Image (spheres, grey):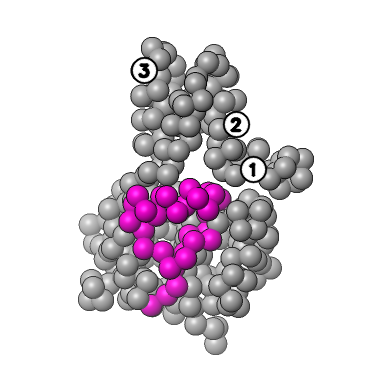
Amino acid sequence: MPPEVHALLFDTYGTVVDWRPAVLAALVEVGRARGLTVDWEQVLADWEPRPIQDRVNAGALPWMTMEQIHRRAATEALARHGVTDLSPEDLDRLVHVRWALPPWPDSVPGLTRLKRRYVISPLSNASFAGMVRLAKFAGLPWDCIITAENARRYKPAPEVYRTAVALLGLPAGQVMLVAAQLRSARRAERGLAHRVRAATHRVRAGPDHRPGAGGGVGRGGARLRRPGREARRLSAALSPRSA
């Protein structure tokens, strides 16, 4: 019989908070203030931190926080669209918008209910400072905050997942990853060399939920990609009857 799950680790951007509209709006606002006519949707698509994160993980670049990485990635993306003269204050505004993002409508109620049964924490590539500020802004009721910065590596490096489990003081089998994407669970499995228990969709809210209609960690009955005893317990923890 598998061990009981005691802790839930959450991917955060996209799973718990809705990041894209706010970041796009910040780009559009900065462009409007500067009188720039740019395809801001494409700028956002080109604003990709992953290549820099991979170089940090490989040791080709020194450790940088996600704020430093986002600033560098934004500068490169903007330059590809001919925007090279934004002020440091403009770049700060674009980078720090990720500190003030709205949660999905059901995220805070869902996390609050899950907190009664489980230890809950983010496991994000965000900086520790950024995740603290986001939690404060969005009212996310974490028991603790764990980020890639604790391991000084970025997901999907194995050290990130191993560090999170070690900090919780639990065997890997007692920790569940909650993520909006299946690939996040697969990365965790590789990192821990352990079969990861994972809710690989957002835990979705109630009978009126439509696929793709948003929703974070859930209000009504939870529906998980990988069912099982712990999935049923997670569903029960989110049930309106547990409110």
Q: Look at mark 3 in the image and give the residue it sits on.
A: 33
The three-letter code of the residue at mark 3 reads Ala
Q: Look at mark 2 in the image and give the residue it sits on.
A: 72
- Graded by Cα atoms within 10 Å as few (under 14), some (14 to 19) or many (20 or more), the crowding at tag 3 reads few
Residue depicted at x 53% and y 53%: 128
Q: Earlier in the sequence, mark 1 or mark 2?
A: 1
Q: Look at mark 1 in the image and give the residue it sits on.
A: 64
Q: Which numbered disc covers residue 43?
A: none
Residue 41 image position (x, y, % from top left): 43, 26
Looking at the image, residue 166 lies above or below residue 57: below
Q: How far is the residue under mark 1 from the one under mark 3?
A: 29 Å
- Graded by Cα atoms within 10 Å as few (under 14), some (14 to 19) or many (20 or more), the crowding at tag 1 reads some
Q: Earlier in the sequence, mark 3 or mark 2?
A: 3
Q: Earlier in the sequence, mark 1 or mark 3?
A: 3
- Under circle 3, the secondary element is helix
Residue 142 image position (x, y, % from top left): 41, 64
Looking at the image, residue 18 lies above or below residue 1: above
- Graded by Cα atoms within 10 Å as few (under 14), some (14 to 19) or many (20 or more), the crowding at tag 2 reads some
Q: How far is the residue under mark 3 from the one under mark 2?
A: 21 Å
Residue depicted at x 45% and y 73%: 119
